[in-house]
Image (spheres, grey):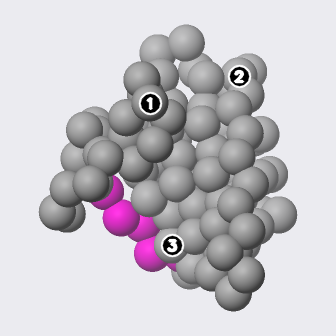
Amino acid sequence: MFLVSLIDNRAREVGFAAMNLRSSDIFLTQFVENSTSYSNTCNMLNVYDPVEIIIPNTLAASKIALTISQTFQNAKTTYVARKLYNETKGDYVNSSL
């Protein structure tokens, strides 16, 4: 059972974090998404089969969010403030959702 968090930027770099909710193991990766269909991201999501996917609310109307919501309908999609992703420190900023 996995929780996945994604972030995407204009250069189509995807940050991907998957946490195993049973063991608390975390897998982190970053890659360039070359496909307009976000096939690499979808493949990663298929591998982890998350129960929840967390995405910054700034991506709510984006192609990646639309693809995820259509392809992974069994996973809960949660949109959070982008400020909760701290790109400088590389860690989660403590804030209320």
Residue at label 1?
89
Please tell me whether residue 72 is drawn above or below residue 9 in the rendered image.
below
Q: Is residue 82 left or right of residue 72?
A: left
Q: Nearer the viewer, residue 92 or 73?
A: 92
Report, in whole angstroms, how far the alpha carbon at label 2 lies from the one at label 3.
22 Å
Q: Amino acid type of disc 1? A: Lys
Q: Position of residue 57 (x, y in %)?
A: 27, 46
Q: Position of residue 17 (x, y in %)?
A: 62, 51
Q: Position of residue 56 (x, y in %)?
A: 34, 45
Q: Specify whether residue 76 is painted magenta.
A: yes
Circle 2 crowding by C-alpha within 10 Å: few under 14, some 14–19, many from 20? some
The residue drawn where x is 31% and y is 47% is 93
> Could you tell me if the residues under marks 1 and 3 are in contact, i.e. CB atoms within 8 Å?
no
Report, in whole angstroms, how far the alpha carbon at label 1 lies from the one at label 3.
24 Å
Sequence-wise, the earlier of marks 2 and 1 is: 2
Sequence-wise, the earlier of marks 1 and 3 is: 3
| Badge 2 element | strand
Quarter holding the C terminus is bottom left
- Residue 32 is marked as 2
Residue at label 3?
52
The residue drawn where x is 46% and y is 43% is 91
Residue 21 seen in the figure:
yes
The residues colored magenta run 75-79
* Closer to the eye: label 1 or 3: 1
Quarter holding the N terminus is bottom right
| Badge 1 element | loop
Sequence-wise, the earlier of marks 2 and 3 is: 2
* Closer to the eye: label 2 or 1: 1
Can you tell which quarter of the image residue 29 is in?
A: top right
Can you tell which quarter of the image residue 45 is in?
A: bottom right
